[in-house]
Amino acid sequence: METHDVFPQSKCKGQFNKQIFYRLDRICEDCYSLFREPQILSFCKKQCFTTDYFKGCIDALQLTDEIEKFKPLIKVLNGADPNTEGCFGTDYFLACVEALFLEEEKEKFMKWREMLGKKK
């Protein structure tokens, strides 16, 4: 299967960049090779490499020192939805929070989102 064919299945909504996609996909493939669990492969790629499984694979493959390099790559693949109104209230916003590994600040963002939503 061509990498470009897999891109839509990965739920990535951003720019297709074969080199970036292949680099992140390789992490999932290597993680699968390490554990030999078919679910790991699909869970790692799920939601365009933004799940805890992807982060777990980074840890398992001892790539945590490279995590800062992966964040902008994931951001390119996730992209921005230009047709989104009120972006802070969308699933896309929450996916960005996850993609940028900002889970620990999610509560703060949700408060900001609520406050911004009240102002018109």
Image (cartoon, rainbow, N blue to C red):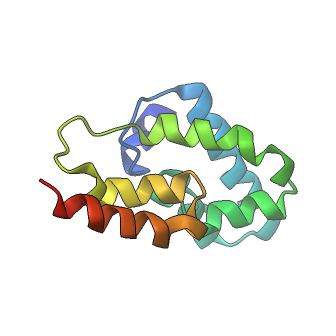
At horizontal 56% and vertical 36% (from top left) the residue drawn is 21
> Does 86 sit above or below residue 73?
below
> Does 17 sit above or below residue 52?
above
Which residue is at the far left? 120
Number of marks: 0
| In-image side of 88 versus 39 (left or right) | left
| In-image side of 48 versus 25 (left or right) | left
Task: Report if residue 26 is visible in the image.
Answer: yes
User: x, y (%) of residue 42?
Assistant: 54, 63
At horizontal 67% and vertical 42% (from top left) the residue drawn is 70
User: x, y (%) of residue 51?
Assistant: 55, 64
At horizontal 60% and vertical 69% (from top left) the residue drawn is 104
User: x, y (%) of residue 75?
Assistant: 51, 40
| In-image side of 37 versus 80 (left or right) | right
Examine the image and state in which quarter residue 36 appears.
Answer: bottom right
Examine the image and state in which quarter residue 117 appears.
Answer: bottom left
At horizontal 44% and vertical 42% (from top left) the residue drawn is 78
